[in-house]
């Protein structure tokens, strides 16, 4: 099937600018302004007040310029948001040795380090989680993160499609787990948990909900807050699953089809 030749018009708003392939006309633009300066102030605003606070008018106000001054550098708010997300992700500097390098102990360690690193980016800029994912990564830093994860998976026996699916699965796992943890952070305390359990025992019928009440009666849950975070648990189970798949394949029990 013939493939359509790519062109700048096929790129989402802002992506061509991120790659340096497109530059809005700066005719009549203020010398003190630049896309980089606009993005810097917009990120600072989002870090403080959330993504909903970001608008061309508000960013212009924080910069001390008119809204029209921004449009001489960026064509739309959508372009601004794309560039903000890419800048906030930044270069995935995961420290030497480089992920996927021969000196790296193993693929699990490299993959785990990638997951923890991108989780930290989300914690530094939680508003990224409010920006909808509408397609595959296309901006420079997002693709650098994908490159680093694929390097971590390179020593495995996964097929190309399995590597891609594994990468997408892990990215979604980290994103959703971090989002959930941040959403409940204000109520994630021992007192809140104890109050929740108490409410369950008042509301639920012991016969209809015997497993739920049995679970929350287990003394182990009394120290759940010391058992480690949910992402670490999910991440280790993800890695176990990948390892089990490769082990079955090594034994001939599970061949890619």
Image: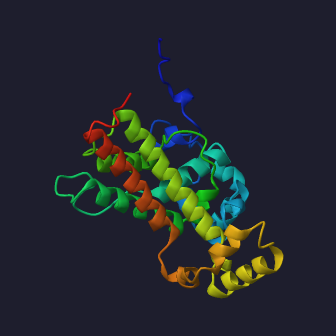
On screen, residue 236 versus residue 192, left or right, reads: left
On screen, residue 204 versus residue 14, left or right, reads: right
Which residue does the image show at 80% across and 73% down from the upper left? Answer: 204
Instruction: Please identify the residue farthest to the left as the structure is shown.
Output: 103
On screen, residue 25 versus residue 115, left or right, reads: right
Instruction: Please identify the residue farthest to the top as the structure is shown.
Output: 1
In front here: 40 or 48? 48
Q: Is residue 45 above or below residue 69?
A: below
- Determine which quarter of the picture holds residue 240: bottom left
Figure quadrant of the C terminus: top left
Which residue does the image show at 70% across and 64% down from the upper left? Answer: 61
Q: Is residue 154 visible?
A: yes
Residue 7 location (% of width, % of height): 50, 25
> What's the image's color scheme?
rainbow
In front here: 206 or 225? 206
In front here: 166 or 76? 166
Q: Is residue 59 above or below residue 171?
A: below
Residue 4 location (% of width, % of height): 50, 17
Q: Is residue 32 visible?
A: no
- Determine which quarter of the picture holds residue 59: bottom right
Residue 91 location (% of width, % of height): 38, 56
Which residue does the image show at 45% across and 67% down from the upper left? Answer: 232
Residue 142 location (% of width, % of height): 45, 48
Q: Is residue 15 above or below residue 2?
A: below
Tally of marks: 0
Instruction: Please identify the residue farthest to the front as the structure is shown.
Output: 207
Which residue does the image show at 35% across and 34% down from the upper left? Answer: 160
């Amino acid at each position: 099937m013939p493939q359509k030749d790519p062109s700048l018009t096929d790129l989402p708003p802002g992506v061509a600018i991120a790659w340096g392939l497109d530059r809005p006309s700066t005719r009549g633009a203020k010398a003190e302004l630049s896309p980089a300066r606009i993005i810097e102030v917009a990120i600072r605003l989002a870090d403080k007040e959330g993504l909903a606070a970001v608008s061309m008018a508000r960013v212009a106000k924080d910069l001390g310029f008119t809204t029209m001054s921004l449009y001489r550098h960026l064509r739309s708010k959508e372009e601004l948001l794309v560039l903000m997300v890419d800048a906030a992700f930044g270069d995935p500097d995961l420290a030497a040795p480089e992920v996927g390098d021969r000196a790296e102990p193993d693929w699990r360690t490299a993959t785990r380090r990638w997951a923890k690193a991108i989780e930290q980016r989300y914690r530094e800029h939680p508003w990224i989680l409010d920006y909808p994912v509408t397609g595959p990564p296309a901006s420079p830093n997002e693709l650098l993160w994908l490159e680093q994860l694929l390097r971590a998976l390179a020593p495995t026996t996964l097929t190309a499609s399995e590597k891609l699916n594994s990468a997408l699965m892990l990215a979604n796992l980290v994103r959703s787990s971090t989002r959930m943890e941040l959403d409940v952070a204000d109520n994630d305390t021992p007192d809140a948990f104890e109050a929740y359990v108490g409410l369950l025992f008042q509301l639920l019928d012991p016969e209809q909900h015997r497993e739920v009440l049995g679970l929350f009666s287990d003394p182990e849950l009394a120290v759940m807050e010391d058992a480690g975070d949910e992402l670490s648990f999910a991440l280790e189970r993800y890695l176990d699953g990948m390892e089990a798949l490769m082990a079955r394949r090594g034994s001939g029990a599970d061949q890619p089809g």
